[in-house]
Amino acid sequence: MAVTMPRVISAVVLAMVACLATMVSPAMGTAGTATFYTPPYTPSACFGNAAEGTMIAAASEVFWGGGAACGDQYVVRCTGATNQGVPHPCTGRSVTVKIADLCPGGCRGTIDLSQEAFAVIADPDAGKIDIEYSRYADHRRGLNLFDDKLAAADGWTRYQVNKYGLEAK
């Protein structure tokens, strides 16, 4: 039985797509560093004296945006050590934190996690770690999905799920 040309082309295209799909990770985030701070967590720059729990973080000027980051959530994952003191600090887990504060001037990391959040992803004895972080959701505007690979005015493409379905923002 002869193989037709469209079937051969379809098979080749499918094989190429499968190979490319294994080389691209949809979960890639932005590289940075994390440190941690200790209680008390109030008052905060975002919420004043209102407690926001312990899975919180202080944003550095990298994404503070004059307070626009308040309430935004980030998924943070340890990727490695920044010093020789603790050569393998990562736990292999990730943590979702809410931005509740501004990291004070001279902030040593991209994001300053609460002590409890830091302990989820790394050994606190490390003090400072390399991380990968991704913006997770903006609860103030409904469920949003963010894709930092597509260009928009601020580097994010927003999609909001509402009662009418999915719409680009």
Image (tube, rainbow, N blue to C red):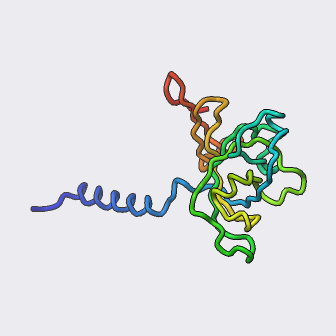
| Residue found at x 65% / y 43% | 156
| Residue found at x 82% / y 40% | 42
Q: Residue at the left extreme?
A: 1
Q: Residue at the bottom extreme?
A: 84
Residue 168 in the image, given as x and y percentages of width and height: 57, 32
| Viewer-proximal residue among 80 and 29 | 80
Q: Is residue 48 left or right of residue 145?
A: right
| Viewer-proximal residue among 115 and 157 | 115
| Residue found at x 85% / y 56% | 107
Q: Residue at the top extreme?
A: 163
- The answer to whether residue 85 is above or below residue 123 is below
Residue 130 in the image, given as x and y percentages of width and height: 69, 64
Q: How many marks?
A: 0
| Viewer-proximal residue among 23 and 39 | 39
Residue 144 image-quadrant placement: top right
| Viewer-proximal residue among 42 and 22 | 42
Q: Residue at the front extreme?
A: 40
- The answer to whether residue 78 is above or below residue 152 is below
- The answer to whether residue 133 is above or below residue 155 is below
Residue 137 in the image, given as x and y percentages of width and height: 62, 39
Q: Is residue 21 left or right of residue 109?
A: left
| Residue found at x 64% / y 58% | 132
Residue 145 image-quadrant placement: top right
Q: Is residue 77 left or right of residue 19?
A: right
- The answer to whether residue 22 is above or below residue 154 is below
Location of the C terminus by quadrant is top right
Residue 1 image-quadrant placement: bottom left
Residue 72 in the image, given as x and y percentages of width and height: 69, 40
